[in-house]
């Protein structure tokens, strides 16, 4: 799984830069904000599978590029809410095309049934890994 993950990250990194002119961490963040907006930085980190500091750096770059708007949260004055700007929505659509094409390329050796099975298995593995992580956070409490 580690090898597959690293190889798909290499494919993704190249695709984000070549086709969307954006680094992979920023592309992941933009994809998550576009799909799940409004998000806090913590929620974004979870949705984009980045740690909070990586997500914060990516957000700042996206804000500097006028792709993301960062505004104060109405429920938590210390927090921020992230949304796409008009320019960000345009780049988000490009990023989503990159993601769809990359996923098709990576799974092109599988049949439609196998892709469906793989997606189900990955969902189960992600849920199990999340449960293990959540349980690890409670050990020694």
Image (spheres, rainbow, N blue to C red):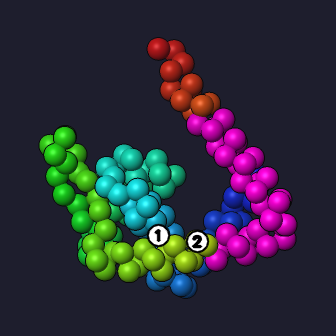
Q: How many marks?
A: 2
**Labels 1 and 2 touching (C-beta < 8 A):** yes
Q: Seen in the image, is 45 located left or right of residue 69? A: right
The magenta region covers 101-130
Ranked by sequence position, the earlier of labels 1 and 2 is: 1
Rendering coords of residue 126 (x, y %):
64, 43
- Give residue 37's mark: none
Rendering coords of residue 65 (x, y %):
29, 77
Q: Secondary structure at mark 2?
A: helix
Residue, x 31% and y 49% (percent of image)? 40
Residue 40 appears in view: yes
- Give residue 99's mark: 2
Pick the front one: 124 or 130: 124
Q: Quadrant of residue 87?
A: bottom left
Residue, x 79% and y 52% (percent of image)? 117
Magenta stretch contains residue 105 = yes
Q: Is 137 above or below relative to 75? A: above
Q: Secondary structure at mark 1?
A: helix
Cα separation, mark 1 vs mark 2, equals 9 Å
Residue 10 appears in view: no
Magenta stretch contains residue 31 = no
Rendering coords of residue 129 (x, y %):
64, 37
Q: Is 119 above or below relative to 11? A: above
Question: Of circles 1 and 2, which is in front?
Answer: 2
Residue, x 51% and y 52% (percent of image)? 49
- Give residue 27's mark: 1
């Amino acid at each position: 799984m580690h090898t597959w993950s690293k190889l798909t990250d290499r494919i993704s990194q190249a695709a984000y830069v070549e086709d969307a002119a954006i680094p992979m961490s920023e592309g992941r963040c933009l994809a998550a904000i576009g799909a799940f907006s409004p998000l806090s930085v913590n929620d974004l980190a979870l949705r984009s599978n980045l740690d909070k500091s990586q997500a914060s750096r990516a957000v700042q770059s996206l804000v500097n590029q006028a792709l993301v708007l960062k505004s104060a949260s109405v429920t938590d004055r210390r927090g921020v809410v992230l949304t796409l700007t008009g320019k960000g929505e345009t780049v988000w659509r490009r990023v989503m095309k990159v993601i769809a094409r990359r996923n098709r390329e990576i799974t092109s050796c599988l049949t439609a049934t196998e892709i469906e099975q793989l997606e189900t298995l990955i969902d189960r593995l992600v849920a199990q890994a999340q449960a293990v992580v959540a349980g690890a956070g409670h050990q020694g409490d």
